[in-house]
Image (spheres, rainbow, N blue to C red):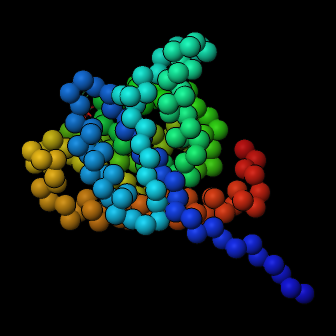
Amino acid sequence: MQISVAPLSVAPLQVTLVVGSNRHGRFGPVVADWLLDRLRDRDDVVPEVVDVADADLPTTFAPTPEATAALASVTPKLATADAFVVLTPEYNHSFPAGLKNLIDWHFTEWQAKPVALVSYGGLAGGLRAAEHLRQVFAELHAVTVRDTVSFHNAGGSFDDEGRLKDSAGPDAAAKTMLDQLVWWGRALREAKERRPYGG
Ligand SMILES: Cc1cc2nc3c(=O)[nH]c(=O)nc-3n(C[C@H](O)[C@H](O)[C@H](O)COP(=O)(O)O)c2cc1C
């Protein structure tokens, strides 16, 4: 008896980077640019960006024209993603309200997809925000990958041109995390090609 096995898709994964801060004068874009470079270094992912600051989603859940217009600019970039990298600062021991709002406006877009977490903040490097996000994404049937990248004292870690003062540790951590994201992204894409997710 011959067992036929469908060929595995080798197309690069669509990875959407979600930039989670929307504070006036925010530091987030500096970390986001470093992260985007790490994604662009790889030939197994195609990066896309959703910035909470640009999305400007209302906090009232109602199908208003404003909400519809805001969703039109972000939802397709979440829906077509095979995997996500979520970049979060830490505000009062958790992640920003604007990021939660973007997450809450969506459901199936997150489902059965992997999420890598990158955090920054003060002494704790945003780790509490990252760990809180694991609980949120579990509810959405998403899988967070084990390894993270975190920047404590983020402002002091980058120079005035936005370059890391010491890149060896963060670059290595990003590679480990993204390798895991790609493994999960491929595994889940292949699984969904065989059988729709039944969550
Ligand atoms: C409202 C607020 C609360 C914060 N709370 C924390 C905190 O609990 N722990 C921490 O390490 N840093 C905290 N910080 C520092 C931020 O994580 C840090 O300034 C970071 O750069 C903020 O990201 P952003 O500049 O992209 O908005 C807080 C900052 C703000 C504005």
The vertical placement of 164 against 140, above or below, is: below
- Name the image quarter holding the C terminus: top right
- Name the image quarter holding the N terminus: bottom right
> Does residue 186 appear in this view?
yes
Is 192 situated left or right of 134 in this image? right
> Does residue 145 appear in this view?
no
Residue 158 position within the rendered picture, expressed as x and y whole percent measured from the top left: 14, 48
Q: Observer-nearest residue: 105 or 126?
A: 105
The vertical placement of 2 against 65, above or below, is: below
Tell me how many marks there are: 0
Pick out the residue farthest to the bottom.
Answer: 1
Q: Quadrant of ligand 1?
A: top left
Kindly identify the residue that appears in the image at 26 percent across and 51 percent down: 34
Residue 29 position within the rendered picture, expressed as x and y whole percent measured from the top left: 27, 39
Kindly identify the residue that appears in the image at 37 percent across and 54 percent down: 148
Is 191 situated left or right of 67 in this image? right
Is 184 situated left or right of 8 in this image? left
Kindly identify the residue that appears in the image at 19 percent across and 61 percent down: 167
Pick out the residue farthest to the right.
Answer: 1
Is 97 situated left or right of 66 in this image? left
Q: Observer-nearest residue: 42 or 155?
A: 42
The vertical placement of 35 against 122, above or below, is: below
Residue 179 position within the rendered picture, expressed as x and y whole percent measured from the top left: 44, 65
Tell me the quarter of the picture where residue 98 sits: top left
Residue 104 position within the rendered picture, expressed as x and y whole percent measured from the top left: 54, 28
Q: Observer-nearest residue: 41 or 130?
A: 41
Kindly identify the residue that appears in the image at 52 percent across and 41 percent down: 77
